C-alpha cells in the first residue's frame, strides 16, 4: 500500500510538470513501401575474415553494390560437420545502423566502420559471431538473411526484418518520449533542472518496462545517452548536478531533427 502511494505521489509530481511516462509503443502502422522480396539482393556481397588480433574473433565484410545505402541487415554464420559435410551449427546476427542515423555529419568515422549505413560502392567491416571456434575461419560460411535500405526498400526473410523494424520503432519512440520529457523539464521561472530529477524519471521509465526485456534495453540505452550528453554539455560543466535551460534547448533541437530523420527509416513490410 505504501509503495502504491509513493508511486501515485511521484506520478502526480510529474503531471504537475506536464510529464507523462508512457509505456513503450508497439509497431505502429506507417505507410508501407515496396513489398519485401523473400531473397537477399544479389547486389550485396559478404565474406568472413579472421580478426586482426584473434583469428577466432570473426569479422564480416559486406560490400554494397545496390543503388541505395544499406542501413541494416541480418546475416547467418554457419559451419559444416567435417565428417558429413552437412551444416552442423549456425548463428544469426543483426547489424543495424539505425542508432547512428543522423550522426553522419557529426562523426568522421573511417569508411570501414560507417555511420548511418553503407553507401553504394562501399565496403564495411563489422564484428561477427563464431558458432564454431574450433574450426578455421576458412571453413565458415556467411549468408545474408535480409537487408533494409535507405530508400525504404527491403529484401529477405520477412520475420527477421520485421524484428529489426520493431526495435527501430522502440528506439524512435524513446526519442519521442525524451522530446516530450525535456520540453517540460525546466519549471517556469527557473534556468536549470536537477540531473537527479531527470535520472529519476529515467529510472521510473525502466521500472515500467521491466517486463519487456527488449524495450527495457532500448530505453536504458537511449536514456543514458541523453543524460550523458546533458551531463557533459559545456553549459553544465561548471554546475555539476544541473542541466541549464540552454543545454536542454540545444538537446531538444537536435532530438527533434533526429526524430524527423529516423522516422524515414521505420516502415512496415508487406
Image (spheres, helix red, strand yellow):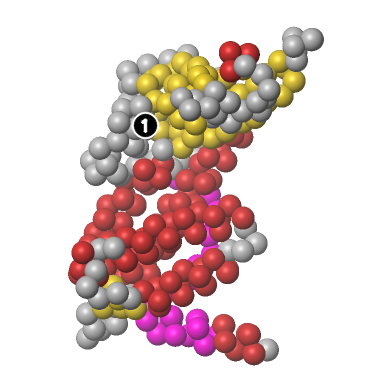
181 vs 74, left or right, is left
The x and y percentages for residue 176 are 39, 59
Residue 143 figure quarter? top right
User: In the image, what residue occupies the spot 43% across and 61% down?
Assistant: 223
210 vs 165, left or right, is right
Q: Nearer the viewer, residue 70 or 51?
A: 51
User: In the image, what residue occupies the spot 52% across and 72% down?
Assistant: 204
The x and y percentages for residue 42 are 47, 14
**On screen, residue 96 above or below 86:** below
The x and y percentages for residue 51 are 49, 25
Q: Residues within 10 Å of mark 1 (few under 14, many from 20)?
A: some
Q: Nearer the viewer, residue 141 or 28?
A: 141
The x and y percentages for residue 30 are 45, 45
Assign the N terminus to one quadrant of the image: bottom right
**On screen, residue 153 above or below 247:** above
Q: Name, please, the residue furthest toward the front.
A: 53
Residue identifier under label 1:
113
258 vs 86, left or right, is left
Does the magenta run of residues contain 244? no
User: In the image, what residue occupies the spot 65% across and 62% down?
Assistant: 211
Kindly tell me whether residue 114 is visible in this rendering: yes
Say what secondary structure mark 1 lies in: loop
Residue range corresponding to the magenta coloring:
8-30
Residue 83 figure quarter? top right
Q: Nearer the viewer, residue 216 or 125?
A: 125
Amino acid at each position: 500500500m505504501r509503495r502504491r502511494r509513493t508511486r501515485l505521489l511521484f506520478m502526480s509530481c510529474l503531471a504537475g510538470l506536464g510529464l507523462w511516462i508512457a509505456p513503450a509503443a508497439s509497431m505502429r502502422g506507417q505507410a508501407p513501401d515496396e513489398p519485401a522480396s523473400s531473397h537477399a539482393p544479389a547486389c550485396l556481397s559478404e565474406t568472413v575474415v579472421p580478426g586482426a588480433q584473434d583469428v577466432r574473433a570473426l569479422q564480416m565484410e559486406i560490400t554494397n553494390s545496390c543503388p541505395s545505402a544499406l542501413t541494416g541487415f541480418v546475416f547467418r554464420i554457419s559451419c559444416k560437420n567435417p565428417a558429413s559435410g552437412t551444416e552442423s551449427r549456425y548463428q544469426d546476427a543483426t547489424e543495424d545502423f539505425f542508432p547512428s542515423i543522423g550522426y553522419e555529419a557529426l562523426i568522421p568515422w573511417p569508411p570501414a566502420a560507417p555511420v548511418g549505413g553503407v553507401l553504394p560502392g562501399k565496403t564495411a567491416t563489422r564484428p561477427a559471431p563464431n558458432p564454431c571456434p574450433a574450426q578455421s575461419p576458412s571453413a565458415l560460411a556467411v549468408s545474408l538473411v535480409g537487408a533494409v535500405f535507405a530508400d525504404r526498400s527491403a529484401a529477405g526473410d520477412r520475420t527477421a526484418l520485421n524484428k529489426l523494424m520493431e526495435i527501430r520503432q522502440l528506439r524512435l519512440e524513446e526519442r519521442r518520449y525524451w522530446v516530450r520529457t525535456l520540453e517540460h523539464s525546466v519549471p517556469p521561472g527557473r534556468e536549470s533542472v536537477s540531473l537527479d530529477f531527470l535520472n529519476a524519471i529515467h529510472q521510473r521509465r525502466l521500472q515500467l518496462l521491466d517486463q519487456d526485456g527488449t524495450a527495457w534495453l532500448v530505453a536504458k540505452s537511449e536514456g543514458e545517452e541523453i543524460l550523458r550528453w546533458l551531463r557533459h554539455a559545456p553549459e553544465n560543466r561548471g554546475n555539476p548536478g544541473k542541466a541549464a535551460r540552454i543545454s536542454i534547448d540545444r538537446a531538444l533541437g537536435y532530438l527533434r531533427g533526429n526524430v524527423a530523420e529516423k522516422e524515414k527509416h521505420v516502415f512496415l513490410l508487406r
